[in-house]
Amino acid sequence: MQTLVEAARRKDSALIAGLDPVPARFPRELRDLPETEATLRFCIGILEAVEPYAAAVKLQAAYFERLGPAGMETYADLIGASSDLGLPVIADVKRGDIGPVAAAYAEAHLGVYGATCVTVNPYMGEDAVLPFLEEARPRGGGVFVLVSTSNPSSYEIQEATDPPLFEFAARLVARLGRSDGDYPDAGAVVGVTRPEIGARVRDLLPEALFLSPGYGAQGGDATGIRPLFDRRGGGVLVNSSRSILYAYEGTDSDYTQAAGEAARLTRDELRLAGAHL
């Protein structure tokens, strides 16, 4: 996690800019291109626009997988381009499978493609998480485990039991993480849309780094971030995707200029809320 922490401190930013490219929402001048080419051009423009304001970027792998082999080449190209810009990459893959399969996924996204961190689904227990940590550790990377997510129906599983399932996931994170820096290498995905749940997760994980989606288009705001802070008043990286990517919609602005301005405003909002590392 130290790579993310250092980038966040260097930029004085807790913002993670998410890349969820939907070709139908691209500017008109890109929609006539083949989808793979349009996606690469669009995302490169976004990367260059948000670089001054974002600590890192999060690539949602599904939007590249849907484009087939050429889409995964684009995924690799964007990880490389992000690295060239000094932006660590979180591969949002949410994989979760038995040990040997998890190890193959980990080698693919952390080794072959070169992401800094990945998101992991812990439903199959330690077997689904530890191989990612074992791949990430020698590379200086980390793993964000789904604990309390921002989607509306997450409560149907994560809060349905007594004690709730998200507490078991949090305890798994606490048990598996190792700390050679400011934060353990196992972090938690904790959405900002249900701050009361986030506060409970923070009680269970006082030292962990949180990756917090749901800010902006999903309805999360600064009031949902503060309950997630650690005892030092930080420990949270906040992801915003659609509200940055498509900030140009309904305006006369160039999409890169609009994305850059949206990223700047979001970074400043997070600073005012007290988010820092």
Image: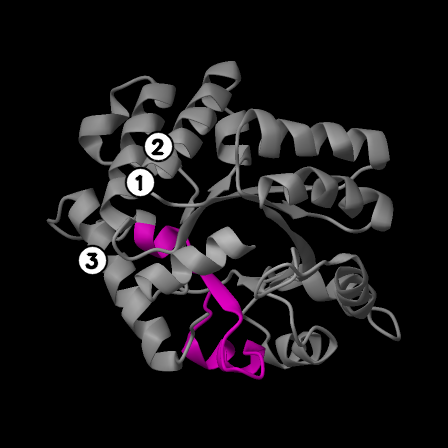
Looking at the rendering, the stretch of residues picked out in magenta corresponds to: 217-244
Going by the picture, which residue comes out furthest to the front? 180
Q: Which of labels 2 and 3 is toward the front?
A: 2
Give the distance between the C-alpha atoms of the residues marked 1 and 2, in whole angstroms: 6 Å
Residue 185: image tag: none
Discs 1, 2 touching: Cβ within 8 Å:
yes
| Residue drawn at (52%, 18%) of the image | 68
Viewer-proximal residue among 208 and 10:
10
Report the side of 162 relative to 16 (left or right).
right
Q: Could you tell me which quadrant the N terminus lies in?
A: bottom right
What's the residue type where badge 3 is placed?
A: Glu
Name the residue that disc number 3 marks: 261
Asked where in the image residue 179 lies, by quadrant, the reply is bottom right
- The percent coordinates of residue 260 (x first, y second) are 22, 52
Name the residue that disc number 1 marks: 85
Report the side of 236 relative to 252 (left or right).
right
Going by the picture, which residue comes out furthest to the right? 162
Name the residue that disc number 2 marks: 81
Viewer-proximal residue among 228 and 162:
228
Q: Is residue 228 magenta?
A: yes
